[in-house]
Image: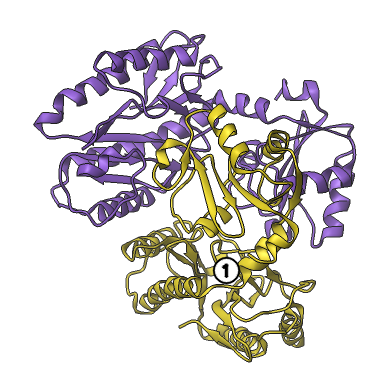
Chain colours: A yellow, B purple
Amino acid sequence: MKKLFETVDVVIIANTTVRDENFFYVTRLPGMWEYSFAVVFPDRVEIIAPPLEEGTAHTYTNRREMEKLLKRMVDAERIGFNGERLPYNHFRYLKKLLGGKWIDVSRILSEQRAVKRKDELHLIKKACRISLRIVEQLYQMDERMSERELATEIEHEMRKNNACPSFDTIVAYGIHTASPHHTPTNKRWVLPALIDLGAKYRGYSSDITRSFVERRGKKLHEIVENALHMAVDEMKSGVAARSIYKLVEDYFGRYGYRMRHALGHSIGINVHDGFSITRNADFVLQENMVFAIEPAVYLKRYGIRIEEDVVVGKNTSTIIR
Amino acid sequence: MKKLFETVDVVIIANTTVRDENFFYVTRLPGMWEYSFAVVFPDRVEIIAPPLEEGTAHTYTNRREMEKLLKRMVDAERIGFNGERLPYNHFRYLKKLLGGKWIDVSRILSEQRAVKRKDELHLIKKACRISLRIVEQLYQMDERMSERELATEIEHEMRKNNACPSFDTIVAYGIHTASPHHTPTNKRWVLPALIDLGAKYRGYSSDITRSFVERRGKKLHEIVENALHMAVDEMKSGVAARSIYKLVEDYFGRYGYRMRHALGHSIGINVHDGFSITRNADFVLQENMVFAIEPAVYLKRYGIRIEEDVVVGKNTSTIIR
């Protein structure tokens, strides 16, 4: 938080008509927290919320009380806010109510969130392991379920592990694998198949993809797998994200394949948590950043994507197992 | 849409770092549509999107192309936007890029969305019926599941019906029913019990609550049920929402109970779709508005809430069955 308070005296994180996941980040409190505010000071966080959330918060029962609480709490000149979440109308309303100089701190917030604390790493690993266990069950599956049935089974399995899906599970069979973002249908099981799933555990996400191919897909599967390991082997603190992208792009280029989407994205509270590894990425990897790395090749009749979650280390990186 | 274009020439609905559910409302297209724009004219809607969404959209592969498309498409003086969703940073960016006069149309949009079209009513009813069928199964349930297990089962059942939860299912046993927004735990089945669930079907939500009580709760259950029917019987086109609230508030008051939350809320694409029936509600019911009506009494040791979804008619209202 230190860097944050070099430019502002206080930060307001607002859950209004739009939820800001930073509310959870700064308070560590689960729950909806509708129409609630986290007022972040260098040494503490105060919460203003409706009476549904009694106990940990200063509660209000009407707008006048809410305004009084906000004014009493936020007695500062330089007020930080998240310009990537706070809707325009609510920005205007709060600025008029509280006065002061309003400074967008979205970039600092997302940079800070990209480097995970120990407890966050722990939860992400746990989320990954739930996903990986489900992935292993896929290999033993003998029932021939439709795309939709399998997606339902996968999400049910997550819930049995006290997790929930961090995004809508993708199950694609046959030609459906050629589309990166397929929505499951009633299509019956056939190879190739692509399954992209992610359990969310106590607020933290994972994101894993497996592709299953017939014999003639094996070669391409190997190329995509090589790309994955090539990327992971280069990832470490200090490396420019775009150089990792370039490496895979060049490798695929040698076979005449092109990249159709980012090579990877940071994961955390959100499954897309702020930073993407693309051709123009302008950031450098740091220790304890966590990325989903997902090289993929989409041909006309089918596609192959393999995705693992990777913790960046000082001199090396590790695929979460 | 007519009223919308009295004050603006074009409306931009943007899915940026925040999703705007109005993108689905104006395009009728399912899917994520990340970093996409719906440009709404009086007679048509144009879509600008990344190449993942090829087919129905004008696609861009980088920011420069996106800006070119936006500039070419939005050649207007009065530009409408949704100030309740568009984050401050993206408002600033778009306004600078496109110039013109920017007008917040959030209120008109939500008023319009409150009155459902025929196809929307059809989908909401279908969503309700999926929820109601699950509710019926609850009455026949003999297995004694924990709160968490039952919530998982309920959501699994939704998925088997090609639906998904429109919010996190609430299952509360015993003293947990005293809290309006309980998160399911491993607590084993005991009466009283409160179950609040809602299936979402093809983009449209439902929201149903049932309370199960022992003999000594029967009287209170009847009072809450009376409140529900009292409210529904008064709902029709032209009636002020706050008068419905007042009716129930007064009725509960006669028994010494007070209202702890809104009597109801509009449902639609969102399960809380914009309008709440509260003491200070400033709107009038109109034909084809749809509300979840949820009178509730929370005592120290338990609570009772009963919730049904109601379509407002010209001279009467109907609980969806």
Left or right of A153 on screen, residue B174:
left
Chain to which the residue tagged by mark 1 belongs: A
Measured from the top left, where is residue B280 in percent x and y? 51, 19
Please, what secondary structure does the residue beneath circle 1 have? Answer: loop
> From where the camera sits, is residue A99 visible?
yes
Q: Residue at x 39, y 79 (%)?
A: A136
What amino acid type is highlighted by mark number 1?
Ile
Front-most of B269 and A281? A281
Left or right of B285 on screen, residue A54:
left
| Figure check: A272 above or below B254 | below
**Disc 1: which residue:** A267
Left or right of B3 on screen, residue B225:
left
Front-most of A129 and A72? A72
| Figure check: A73 above or below B308 | below
Measured from the top left, where is residue B304 in percent x and y? 25, 32
| Figure check: A226 above or below A67 | below
Q: Residue at x 42, y 62 (%)?
A: A202
Measured from the top left, where is residue A39 in percent x and y? 59, 49
| Figure check: B150 above or below A313 | above
Task: Name the residue at the left extreme.
Answer: B215
Quadrant the N terminus of chain A occupies: bottom right
Measured from the top left, where is residue B273 in percent x and y? 53, 33
The residue carrying pointer 1 sits among few (fewer than 14), some (14 to 19) or many (20 or more) residues within 10 Å by Cα, namely many
> From where the camera sits, is residue B17 visible?
no
Q: Residue at x 41, y 11 (%)?
A: B316
Front-most of B272 and B310? B272
